[in-house]
Image (cartoon, grey):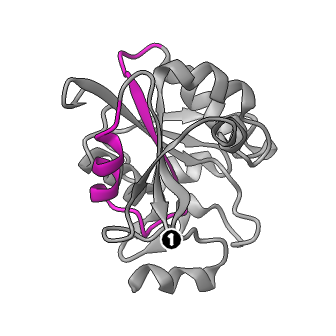
Amino acid sequence: MSSVGEVEVAGVVLAGGAGRRFGMPKALVEHEGALLVERAARVLADGGCSPVLVVLGAAADEVRERADLSGAAVVLNPDWETGMGSSLRVALDALTSTDADAAVVLPVDMPGIGAAAVRRVAELASPSALAAAAHDGRRSHPVLLGREHWAGARTAATGDAGARGYLRDREVALVPCDDISAGFDVDRPEDLPRADT
C-alpha cells in the first residue's frame, strides 16, 4: 500500500453503470486510445492511491476481457442496476479489510480529472477527512472520504446519489482544481470532445 505522507489512501473507480444515456457502459468507452475504466484506474494509481479498486457491474465480463486493469483490484457489484450508490457501498465494504485511512472516489465518466487533481485532494487525507475537488466553485470529483466516514457514507449511498446526501449534511473541504483538471462528466457521446479541450 502506498501512502500520501503517513496516511494510506485507497482509490475507488465507480464503473458499474450501464450508461443508458450514452448507449453503452461507460467503462467500455474508448477515448484517446484507452478505455475510460483503464484511464480512471491509472489516474488514481498515478495520483498515489493504493490499493485501487474498480467496481464493475454492467458488462463486467466484457470489461474484464477488454480492459487492462493490472494493478487494480476488481470488485463486482451484483446490484449495479440500483445505481451508483450500490457501487460505492460495495467499494467501501471491500476497503474495510484494508489498512487504508481514506479513499479517493472517482466516477469512470470524468476523463477531465487527472493524477494532479487526485494528488491535490489526497493531500488532505486522514481518517476524519471529507474533501472534494472544486470546479467552477462547486463540489466535484474526486471526493476524499476518511475512514471514519465510510459507515455513514455507505448508509447514505442510495440510487444514483453516491455519497452526495452524506456530504451535503457535513463540512467538506473544497480543493480548487480548475487549474489542473476539468470537472465535467460524460453522459452522452457528444460530451467526449470536451475532454480534448
Q: Name the spot of residue 196 as percent of width and height, x first.
A: 40, 84
Check the image and name the residue furthest to the front: 171
- In which image quadrant can residue 195 be found? bottom left
Q: Name the spot of residue 179 as percent of width and height, x first.
A: 32, 71
- Up-down relation of residue 138 to residue 188 (above or below): above
- Up-down relation of residue 26 to residue 148 (above or below): below
Residue at 68 percent across and 53 percent down: it is 17
Q: Is residue 134 on the magenta stretch?
A: no
Q: Is residue 6 left or right of residue 27?
A: left
- How many residues crowd mark 1 within 10 Å: few (<14), some (14–19), many (20+)? few
Residue numbers of the magenta segment: 97-125
The residue tagged 1 is: 136
Residue at 30 percent across and 33 percent down: it is 50
Residue nearer the viewer, 148 or 172: 172
Residue nearer the viewer, 94 or 120: 120
Identified by mark 1, the residue type is Asp
Q: Name the spot of residue 118 as percent of width and height, x first.
A: 34, 50
Residue at 36 percent across and 47 percent down: it is 121
Q: Secondary structure at mark 1?
A: loop
- Up-down relation of residue 152 to residue 180 (above or below): above
Q: Is residue 99 left or right of residue 193?
A: left
**Which quadrant of the rendered structure holds the C terminus?**
bottom left
**Which quadrant of the rendered structure holds the N terminus?**
top left
- In which image quadrant can residue 9 be found? top left
Check the image and name the residue furthest to the left: 5
- Up-down relation of residue 97 to residue 187 (above or below): above
Q: Is residue 113 on the magenta stretch?
A: yes
Whether residue 108 can be seen here: no
